[in-house]
Image (cartoon, helix red, strand yellow):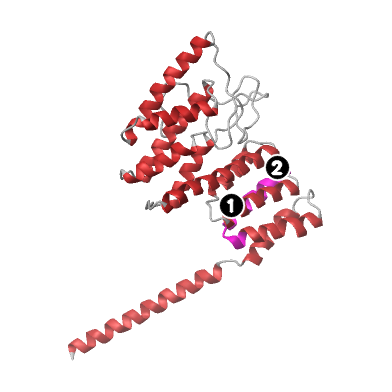
Amino acid sequence: MKLNKIKNNLISNLIILALIVFIVSFAFAAEEPTVDEQLKQLKSILDSSSKYSDFQKNQMLLPALKGLLESGIPFEDTKEIIENSVEESFDAYSVKKVFDVILDTQQEGLPTEQLINKVNEGFAKNANKTVIISVISAKAENLRKAAEILNKAQQEGLEINGEEKMVGILADGLENDVPDESLSWLLKTGTTEGKSILEISEISEELSYLSLMAYDSGLSQEEISLLFKKAIENSTNIDEICENIQSSLETQISTAKTETGGTVKPSATSDSGTLPTSSTGSPVEIGETPTQDAGEAPTETGGTPEPSTSPTGEAPPPLEN
């Protein structure tokens, strides 16, 4: 009798718990605004600016915003871009191009967080609209190339955890001119050797540092690719590659200085887009910190760049990684 009573109490408690979970879930679902409600909020932001015509708002931007929301782009991210666009007086056609790049990337199943961050960081630095569009377009292309590297490795039977994070890591390497073949080798060898995503990320960052150092030393992209290829061929494990690249790089720089009388070519502006700088400053990419001097190992945070001085004498706020 006592056992039946305990059993009935347990059943009653489970039913009550299930009801509570259902009610709470329903309450949260009821509070979540629909896409149409979110669009009304975004339209009110657009209406606050006299810069956009009715055609631009109703026929261009709102349909694009609806596409972003329906594809899964978070409302807060979409709202932030619109607010920044209005504040910075971005024209509707440039805003639409930004949305198109993000939407295309999202629909391809690629991570879009890095694109959104670069857009907002570009706004924060008062970057030219052409630069922002160029930078996120280049980033989107690097994400596609990174996904191809990952897919090829998986087709060869490699099991990879954390695919989205890995695509972001590979894309960052490509952005810093690390050769495709080197990143593919890093992915395959690192995974085979049981390296964690964090370890592979750290090695990729070091390869990026070495690539940028080689580029700043005057080596061409072809020379950098060959240097990385030889280092990989002479490496018995993944931990040796950076040492081999550093050693080969020092030899290359020494040889180049000897042949050219000590003249090293200045680094050029990357095709991925850079922000305008003063005549004494070096280009800084949106969301990136300046490259470090040769011979210094990068820190976890990428180092703290010295702020450039604006014409008014005020230093711009540092970008966050």
Which residue is at the front of the view, 38 or 272?
272
Q: Which marked residue is nearer to the observer: mark 2 or mark 1? A: 1
Give coordinates of residue 141: x percent, y percent: 58, 44
Q: Secondary structure at mark 2?
A: loop
Name which residue lies at 36% across and 77% down: 17
Which residue is at the front of the view, 233 or 142?
233
Chain part drawn in magenta: 69-89
Q: Is residue 276 above or below residue 92?
A: above
Relative side of 46 to 214, left or right: right
The amino acid pointed to by label 2 is: Glu
Which residue is at the front of the view, 80 or 254?
254
Name which residue lies at 64% across and 25% down: 310
Disc 2: which residue: 88
> Which quadrant, please, contains the N terminus?
bottom left
Callout 2: few (<14), some (14-19), or many (20+) C-alpha neighbours within 10 Å?
Answer: some
Callout 1: few (<14), some (14-19), or many (20+) C-alpha neighbours within 10 Å?
Answer: many
Name which residue lies at 55% across and 48% down: 144
Which of the marked residues, 2 or 1, is nearer the chain's N terminus? 2
Extreme residue toward the top, this view: 261
Residue 321 visible, this orientation: no
Q: Is residue 257 magenta?
A: no
